[in-house]
Image (cartoon, rainbow, N blue to C red):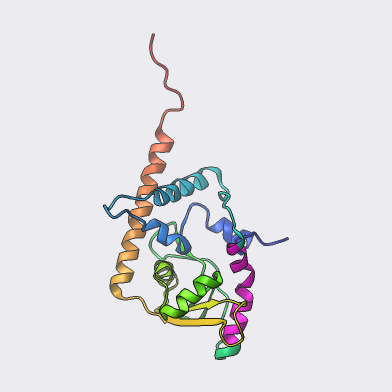
Amino acid sequence: MNEPATGLSTEQLRQRLGCLTASQMKRAMSFTTKGKPTEDRSSYQREMLAERMVGFAMDHYVSPAMQHGIDQEGAAKEAYSWLTGNMIEPLPTIAHPSIPFFLATPDGMLNPDVGVEVKCPTSAKFVLWKLAGEVPEEHKAQMVAQCLCAGFGEVEFIAFDPRMPDGQRLFVRRFKPSDEDMAAVAKAAETFLGEVEEMFNVFTTTPVVEVARV
């Protein structure tokens, strides 16, 4: 059986149904400059509720750039291990020990304290990240969530672009979240999931039919 286009196994997709995942943590923390939830955040909550009700994952568009990232993950890990000598161990989906419906599927780990996150972006984004020389802000929430679920203290961020010249295809930085980072993401996850529970209660108690008396 072919793996889904997400790069996750069928079992992993089943486990993630209706759950807040580390890869979507940024969406769960998306607010406007005025502190209002963005439509992307609200849409994600509705997707989660729908998955809980129907029992299968919502369809999502996979762009060519996204598919490239999925297809190149294995090559990225091989290139990293060849360059550093560090072997990446695979991991299953890991649920948070105390926050229900909150989980992560890390790309692997170097050891129980160091997780691995692999990104294979467009060439323009790869150049941007390498010139900045830092872990991209847009992926920090995901890695903090992985630390919370898997118990990592750090995450090895690996960016890979096979289209670059030899010797320029990898960008690697170690990310260590602060205690403040960990607390903020944990609180955001609890708040987000609490709101989904409220939505579930409203949805399941709303009358199917309302008939006006005549």
Q: Quadrant of residue 141?
A: bottom left
Magenta span of residues: 65-81
Magenta stretch encompasses residue 66: yes
Task: Say left or right for 199 vs 94.
Answer: left
Residue at the image point whose x is 43% and y is 49% from the top: 45
Measured as percent of width and height from the top left, residue 196 is found at 39, 48
Quarter occupied by the C terminus:
top left
Q: Is residue 101 visible?
A: yes
Q: Is residue 117 visible?
A: no
**Vertical relation: 171 (above or below) 183:** below
Q: Report the residue that reaches farthest toward the right.
A: 1
Q: How many marks?
A: 0
Residue at the image point whose x is 51% and y is 43% from the top: 53
Task: Say left or right for 133 vs 56.
Answer: left
**Vertical relation: 27 (above or below) 203:** below
Type of secondary structure dominating the magenta stretch: helix
**Vertical relation: 128 (above or below) 38:** below
Magenta stretch encompasses residue 196: no
Q: Report the residue that reaches farthest toward the left.
A: 34
Task: Say left or right for 138 vs 121.
Answer: left
Quarter occupied by the N terminus:
bottom right
Measured as percent of width and height from the top left, residue 149 is found at 43, 68
Measured as percent of width and height from the top left, residue 200 is found at 41, 42
Task: Say left or right for 162 vs 139.
Answer: right
